[in-house]
Image (tube, rainbow, N blue to C red):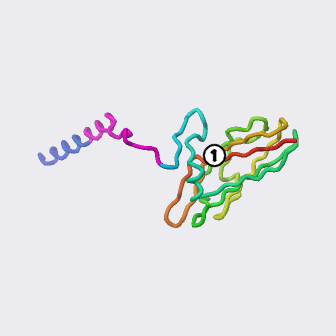
Amino acid sequence: MKQSQFSRGVVAALVITLISIVATGCFKKSQNDKPRKGVVAPNPDKPCSGMVDPEALKKWVSVSVETTPAKLNQPATTRIVWKPASGFKWNKEYPVNIELVQSSGLKIGKRNFTRTDMQASEKSATLRVPFTPAKKGSIAVEACARISVCNDNVCKIIPEQLVSWTVTVN
């Protein structure tokens, strides 16, 4: 009986110690922690500000944007294609999220896209973004993509990839 009470007392003491460690912040970020190479510190006021450095991204995936000159008030489409780097494949299971964060001058019905909006295989993934230009000239467009690619050993999650392009409207 005394052994059982002793065991319960030890367990209770361990639980209390663990709670106090968590409560006092022993798991807080150390002042010596440095940002990871190739990652920009996030800015909550600017979407996609914590993006992965474009040069660092090249070892995992490349992205290309295909757009043609558009006509004012006429429907058009931009095509974005992601291709995994050599040795990687597109992660078709990852819950992709692509958000248009800048598109002033374009009427866009849908601003958020998921993997169900894409055509994907292991070799590439394609997203078509329909829009209607509301003004003439060059219009800057930006999207923030959350994607993933894998090889036989690891899946690389890319939390914020900035994709930028310009639409020319005649």
Q: Quadrant of residue 111?
A: top right
Hey, which quadrant is residue 126 in on the image?
A: bottom right
| Dot 1 amino acid type | Leu
Give the percent coordinates (x, y) of residue 135. Answer: 83, 35
In the image shown, does 132 or 110 lie closer to the viewer? 132
**Image x and y of residue 23, in percent:** 33, 34
Looking at the rendered structure, the number of numbered marks drawn on it comes to 1
Q: Is residue 18 magenta?
A: yes
Residue 66, image x and y in percent?
A: 76, 53
Residue with the most extreme left position: 2
Measured from the top left, where is residue 34 in percent x and y? 42, 43
Q: Foreground: 35 or 114?
A: 35
Q: In this image, 147 relative to 76: left or right?
A: left
- Crowd around label 1: few <14 · some 14–19 · many ≥20 (10 Å): many
Vertical relation: 95 (above or below) 15:
below
Farthest residue, direction top: 45
- Looking at the image, which is closer to me, 150 or 87? 87
Q: Residue at x 58, y 46 (%)?
A: 160
23 on left or right of 74: left
Residue at the image position 76 percent from the left and 44 percent from the top: 166
State the residue at coordinates (47%, 48%): 36
- Quadrant hosting residue 11: top left
- Dot 1 corresponds to which residue? 162
Q: Is residue 49 left or right of residue 65?
A: left
Disc 1 element: strand
Query: Farthest front residue?
Result: 55
Question: Which residues are drawn in magenta?
Answer: 15-36
Q: Quarter of the image containing the C terminus?
A: top right
Q: Is residue 155 magenta?
A: no
